[in-house]
Every structure is written in structure tokens, then in C-alpha cells.
Amino acid sequence: MTKDELREKANDLPLLPGVYLMMDKTGTVIYVGKAKKLKNRVSQYFQDSASHTPKTRQMVAQVDHFDTIFVSSEFEALVLENSLIKRHSPKYNILLKDDKGYPFVRLSAEPYPRFSLVNRPANDSARYFGPFGGRFETRQALDAVCAALRLPTCSRRFPRDIGAQRPCLNFHMGRCDGFCRPEMTQAEYNRRIAQACQLLEGKSRQLLREMTEEMEAEAEALRFEQAAHLRDQINAIAALGKKQTVIAGLCADTDIWGLARSSGKCCYAILHMEGGNLAGRETELFTAPVEEDEGEMLGALTAQYYLPRAILPHEILLPQETEGYCENLSQVLTQRAGHKVWVHVPHRGEKADLLAMAERNAAEEAQRATSDAERTAHTLELLAKMLDLPAPPSRLESFDISNTGSSDIVASMVVYSGIRPLKSAYRRFRIKDLAGTPDDYASMREVLRRRLQRAADGDEKFLPLPDVFLIDGGVTHAAAAQEVAQAFGVTIPIFGMVKDDRHRTRALVTPEGREIGIVTQQAVFTLIGRIQEETHRFAITYHHQSHEKSTLRSALDGIPGVGPKRRDELKKAFGTIRAIREAEVDALAAVIPRPAAEAVWRHFHGPQPEAPSSSQS
């Protein structure tokens, strides 16, 4: 379908809630979304693309047709959207790990049921719990549950192997009550299995209350051995939530979400709280486009995380609200859980502090997992987005002017390849066209004109041209540079680097005066600040060198027998005018001929030089 046909089809949609599926020419679903009003949401994709993010523009360019599914409410759309994302794994949706990474615990349907780990539920008579985290952690948690309730984990099968041989090592180590012994009943086995199911359903508190009541009853009946046995089980179960991440998640009554985007990596962290105490932490890395809004990421992540789960906390704290999303998610999860699930965004107090802790956990995990190459790519992507560049810049050039009054006016050209300085490409200029008072704008025009002319002449030292020009100064400096670029027919973006009162670059400004703040994006702020400091350092260094040379030249001007070559020799030997002034004739004569050395001494000290040191005794 053409874009006009897609727009017409979208405009014919009703103002009803539903889910839409964008498909490419092969019929592959590339994006799944939900909307309160399908017509308004879908038609936006096929209007003017100037307001679209790069991700959206790229996705729309591949859309050949779309389909819609109408539902009765927005929260039904949330459930359906999650289901379709899981089914199709669309290219442009944020995706958590595949279901293969989220194991389920299966309880077989037989007289002596056994637990096992499976990738996904089957349509059989077995009972399933989950999904949980990774397979290793889930296996550890399941073993811990069985150990706490002293259930068998060996390969023996009941009732076939009851009484067939002596109990295994687990019985003698106190990890199993030996259900292979004839005195252990099937009723007791199934009672323990039911208790394990309570743990896997997140009902640990209820189970502990029941077992505590049973222990107290045994103690009152003077059956102290049974009471001690129950006491040990209670202690083991109480310790599960502190030791096992999976069980901690099931026992939690509050989940606190943190979300962080590092250079190239995104990460969420969930703190599981039980009774106001931290029971466990869960983190996962994922990828998302640079321009993806935090609210959109949270919506995608929380729906995919919670909707498949049967065990849900009573409270979920999120760092950001998005268009009533908390209310919709709360409604859906409440229906699933069978109890009220409160989803909200705290703004102050202890819960806001917990959110900050979760976000710190997410940020540290994302930073730890991000490579240098990913940080570089992410920084340049951010810069390109902020400056409306068609692609991340690979070469940046920065210019600065340095002078002392009207003399020794110089300029520096610093080159960055990505986020690294390319020192072999640095260039410096001595301003030639100015006379009298200094003029930074005229100096900048001269420098850029000479730089572009050298490139136009094919000078390889000034090739290739950069993706961005950065000018140390404000809008007038940028405008002066653009004037020269236009004269050469060059369309490279130009930005002035605007400083704050602490001499740090706080913003970039276009020649037209549009200011782009960079302080909120730490990676870009750091990069631009580093470029500005390096450009200034290079200009100041060259200015000092130039000033020293001109000072030396003026101090030695007019001395008979001392021309440019001998000035250079004196500078090389003594370094400074002060050292030359304080040198004896013999020391000067060791560098230049004695008549010239005596002339230098007379220039600084008067008509009569001191007697040669060889005549002194």
C-alpha cells in the first residue's frame, strides 16, 4: 500500500480502543502498539514525518500494511498487546528475554507428584508455577524449597521404590525425611508437596502461620520431637526469602522499579521488599533506541514482566507515570492476582528514597555492562539527535582565537575523531589580515576561509571536511563562520560553544540563534566540554610560543651583528631574554661570534663590557 492509501485506511478507523499491528511487504509484524483511540494513534504514523523520532521514521518507511484488533477497554488492549508482542517478537518493540529464558516449575499429576523445570507450560494435567528468573537460580530455589520441607530430590520413584533399598545419603544428611521408607505415608508426602506449592505461589506468610500453630499444638501435647522438627522447617522456610532471589520475588509484597540508560545499554532493576525489608534484587539488560521515552520503556517492560506471572506483589512503585498507565496496569494485575495490586509513582518520603535506590542499582549495572565502543556510539547518537544531524558525526572540528591586544593573534583548529582527539590533524594559524585593534569575528572569518581554501586546493592536511564545525564563542562567532562556509558552498552544520560563568560550555547555538542546552545529557556535556578545553589549550599554547618569539625578537632588534639566525641560536641556548641579559660575554661568545656577543652585552648593560674571564685571576 502507498502512504496515501495507508493514511486513508487509518482515517477510516473508529475512535475505539484496540491494538494495531504494523507489517512489512513480507507480512512480518514489525511493530505492535495499543491505543485508547485507534484512529488518532494510527493516523499519526502517516502524517508529516518531521515530528517523528528516527526510530518511528525508520519503522514507518518499512510499513506495507497494518491490521487492527478492537477491544472493549484500554486495559484489555494492554493485555492483548503484551500477548502479541510475545508471539511475534516485533523488530521495533522493546523486548525482554524470550520465554526460553524464563523457566516454569512443573508439578506432575501422579500419586507421588514430583517437581521439574520446563521451558513453557504444556496442555496436560500437570500444575505449573512461574515463570521465574534464570534456570540456574530457579533450580537453586526449587532445591532449597525441597530441602526446607525435606522432600526427596533423588531419582527414586514412588510407590515403586518404597522399601526397595536403604534410604540415600540425603536422608542421613537431614535433607530428606526418607519417603522411600515404608513408615512414611503418601498423605504426609502430599501434605509436604502442598506446602511447597504454597511457597511457589507466594503464600509463605500463610504457610508459616499454619506451621507455627501446628508446632505450638505439638508442644502443648508434649510431642516435643515433632515440635522441634516443625521448628526446623519453619526456620528453613523463613530463611528462603533472604537467600534465594526467586523465592524473594514470590514473597515480596512490594516491587520497586529503577530504570537507567547508559552509553549503549539500558537496564531495569527491581527491588523486592517483604514487610519493609529488602528480600532480593533482580536486574536485566535490554536495548532500546536513543530516542525512546522512559515512560514508553516502562510501559513495555512492566507489562511483559508481570502479565505472564500468576504470583504478584501487592504494591508496585514506578519512577514515572505515562497517560494513566499505572491505573490500567493496576486494574489488569488486580484481576490476575485475585487481590488489589496498587501501581503508583511516589514523589516524596521513604518510598521515593527506595525508588532512588532502585535507579542507582539499574545505573550501576548498565554502566558496568557497557563497553567503550558502546559508550562512544551512544554519545555520538545523542549528539546527532540533539543537533538534528542525519547521522552520528565521525569527525568534529573546533576553532578558537587567542591574542594579547592587537599583537600575536593566533588561532587553533582541533580535530576529534568520534570522541577521541586526532592530534595529527591539529592545525594552528597566525592571523595575517588584521591591523590595529583585534577583531575576533574577522579573525574567525580569516581562519575558516584559509582552512576551507586549503581543502578546496586539495591539501590532504585539511581533508576530509568534518561533519560539524564547533566555534568557541556565541551566535555572532557562529554566524561569522557560516558566512565563510556559504561563500565556499559548504553546508556543514556550525555551532557556537556558549560558556557559563565558570567557563564551561553549557550550550551550543546555531548561527540563527537557536540555543541547544547540553547540561542535562552528561555524556554530550562532557564531550563538548572536553573539546572546548582542548581547543582553548592548543590556542593558548601557540599564543604563548608566538608571544615569546615576538618578545625575544623585539628585545634583540637593532643589535649590530645579530640577525634572525643568531637570535634563534641565542634563544635555543638560553631560552629567555632574562637569561640572555644576565649572561657573561664569554657565555654569549660560546654561542655567537665575540663581536656580536659584546654588542649584545652592551645592548643590555651599557658601553663597556666586562673584561674577559681569562684575564681575571
Image (tube, rainbow, N blue to C red):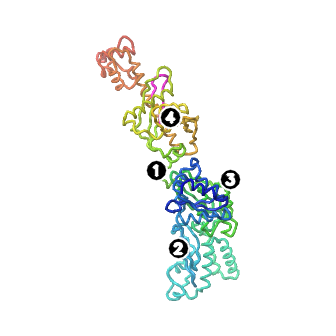
**Residue 492: horizontal and vertical position, in percent?**
48, 38
Q: Of the residues under marks 2 and 4, which one precedes in the sequence?
A: 2
**Residue 356: horizontal and vertical position, in percent?**
62, 53
Name the residue at 63% across, 68% down: 251
Classed neighbour count for the residue bearing mark 1: other residues with Cα under 10 Å, few (<14), some (14–19), many (≥20): few
Query: Alpha carbon of mark 4 to alpha carbon of mark 3: how far?
Result: 41 Å
Three-letter amino acid code of the residue under disc 2? Val
Q: Nearer the viewer, residue 389 or 587?
A: 389
- As drawn, the label of residue 429 is none
Residue 25 visible in image: yes
Figure quadrant of residue 72:
bottom right
**Disc 2 element:** strand
Choose mark 4 or mark 3, whichever is in front. Answer: 4
Query: Alpha carbon of mark 2 to alpha carbon of mark 4: how far?
Result: 61 Å
Three-letter amino acid code of the residue under disc 1? Asp
- As drawn, the label of residue 347 is 3
**Residue 390: horizontal and vertical position, in percent?**
50, 45
Q: Residue furthest top?
A: 607
* Residue marked by disc 2: 118
- Taking the magenta stretch, the answer to whether it contains residue 505 is no
Query: Alpha carbon of mark 3 to alpha carbon of mark 1: how far?
Result: 35 Å
**Residue 151: horizontal and vertical position, in percent?**
56, 79
* Residue marked by disc 4: 471
Region of the chain picked out in magenta, as a range:
398-410
Query: Alpha carbon of mark 1 to alpha carbon of mark 2: how far?
Result: 38 Å
Three-letter amino acid code of the residue under disc 4? Ile
